Amino acid sequence: MTTSTQTATFEAAESLARCRDLVQPALRATVGALDRDLEMRCGFALGWWDSDGRADGHGTGKGLRPALALLGAQAVGAPPDTVVAGAVAVELVHVFSLAHDDIMDGDERRRHRPSLWKAYGVGTAVLTGDALLALALGALAEAPGERHGEAARLLARMLLDLVGGQAADVAFEDRPWTGPRAVTLAEYRHMAVRKTGALLGCSAAIGAALAGAPAGVVAGLEEAGRHLGLAFQAVDDVLGIWGDPSVTGKPAFGDLRRGKKTVPVLTALADPRGGDRLAELLSGERTGPEVRQAAALVAEAGGRAAAERMARHHLDAAVGGLRGLGLAEPAAAELIAVARSLADRRQ
Amino acid sequence: MTTSTQTATFEAAESLARCRDLVQPALRATVGALDRDLEMRCGFALGWWDSDGRADGHGTGKGLRPALALLGAQAVGAPPDTVVAGAVAVELVHVFSLAHDDIMDGDERRRHRPSLWKAYGVGTAVLTGDALLALALGALAEAPGERHGEAARLLARMLLDLVGGQAADVAFEDRPWTGPRAVTLAEYRHMAVRKTGALLGCSAAIGAALAGAPAGVVAGLEEAGRHLGLAFQAVDDVLGIWGDPSVTGKPAFGDLRRGKKTVPVLTALADPRGGDRLAELLSGERTGPEVRQAAALVAEAGGRAAAERMARHHLDAAVGGLRGLGLAEPAAAELIAVARSLADRRQ
């Protein structure tokens, strides 16, 4: 790790904290308008309290998406308070998608706690997700000013990408590890740019759209955000296999146990140095010793390095894109620092 | 049945068919933009084909909500093609809410077919519902013209009502039949105006909002649609107990078997002529003979008559409201004919 990375991480943490302070009151007020039961469940999904209503400081996210929305707006010269609604909307959409994805993926843990459906049952988790999405739309529709049109289009397109990407990801589960029907890296990238990239792209652009920035700048911010999403997903793929369970809150080698088709695995499967042996291992039981051995095979075949390369490539593309937009300082530098910190995250 | 009712029903059927013809191409195009798998599942939810992709003519809804949207717009003088997106949006939101509600309520049948979750599994039904909602937002956001703001606000508020109403309806299940914690008729009405009234209100108003009608007219159409929703719900409550299974596609006395707290039941429970006996029956097994007996008790205690009175009252309020708005003919007369036909429906 270099000193410049450490500086970027430190600056990013400061920016994220500042953005959280700006967004949190509006987010609380938005969720607080719900009936008590729904409010409690939405707050649980947002990590504000556990299922007994106790706030324990765990579980709240870093607020990456609202930070991108605020910084994107500040980078086009908008005062943050006029675009907070966009930041609130993308955070709520993010938590909506986690709530519903956890049902589909059968994930029982989220942010060191039971997932929403595990805590409250599937029906309640479906409805709470719907409530989070409805709140997001409400926040955006009631935002001050009369520039909702472009922001609403960004949000709607992003949601269509989100469901399309999730559908593709779920469909990958039924595809074989090898042969002509195996998932290709190109298919994976197309899935990831929709499932992960679209929301980061929308986040980076929505504040600027609400502020009435020129279409080219809004599109450039969205494109940079999509690259950031692909970098984010590649890092996620590495953490999903080699992340520290005590930091990520997820089991060791989790993605291998679940048979997820990720960049490291797809790269390694295509490698002559052990792809067949890996496919054999992944087609089997995928319990303790097998997943450890599979992880070693994936690393040896260059799967981890490929994912790290992919993360760097898309991070560079995002940073390069942001630099080319002629954005205002210091928000532009903060955006870049936040972007860099993503590629260096541990959870 | 009077001749004027028969005429209204006939006219309503003609209006609904004309509106379906106007909306269907746009609806097909909207859903057709999805990836194949999601398109097939959304089309299944819309009743276009069964799970093998066979179109059998069953299952397609009457298109009440899009008809309200189109007629509401025509009633303020707008040409239908400028507001079709609003009609598409409310139909998609309707089918989204059915898809998710069937999961929460455990309903296995819908429109003479397996419900979406029963046909494809819960995870797929969650995602398909999300896709339908995303399509609705996309249709509205990409609508021609620049008057999305008010339409987007109507839609967002309606969605918040929808989830709040569904949450209340689900919570009613855990409440006792009698005593201080029993569900009151006022609570029921508040639930129904959100769960059913909000979407019909939004439907009646959204086309006019997209067409740029004055705020007072948009609000008046929304209010009339909400009354229509309450009338619709009261009729639904009657059909849920006394509807003909061969017409409704639902089991006889279905709402009694499921222990639903509806207007007829809540009214009868409050009646000295047999409320206690009814509560006792409903607290028991609720199989064959008990539900038949319970249905007779509900009718004897005036529960059916109360629901029919409620339907008439809100229908009159809707029609009176529409008449007071100075709407353009023939759309105004068609709106009223469609409204009247709702109170006379068998399914």
Image (cartoon, coloured by chain):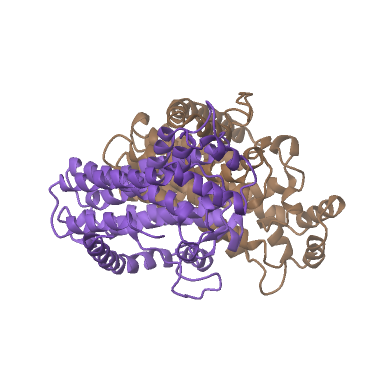
Chain colours: A brown, B purple
Left or right: B207, with A2 as reference point = left
Image x and y of residue B229, in percent: 34, 47
Image x and y of residue A67, in percent: 47, 35
Q: Nearer the viewer, residue A45 or A63?
A: A45
Rendered position, A108 above or below A330: below
Image x and y of residue A286, in percent: 81, 55
Q: Locate the N terminus of chain B by quadrant.
A: bottom left
State the residue at coordinates (43%, 51%): B238
Does the image show residue A91? Answer: no
State the residue at coordinates (53%, 53%): B254
Left or right: A302, with B321 as reference point = right
Rendered position, B87 above or below B219: below
Image x and y of residue A335, in percent: 47, 37
Left or right: B212, with B38 as reference point = left
Residue at the right extreme of this rendering: A289
State the residue at coordinates (14%, 51%): B327
Q: Locate the C terminus of chain B by quadrant.
A: bottom left
Q: Nearer the viewer, residue A334 or B334?
A: B334
Does the image show residue A281? Answer: yes
Count of picture labels: 0
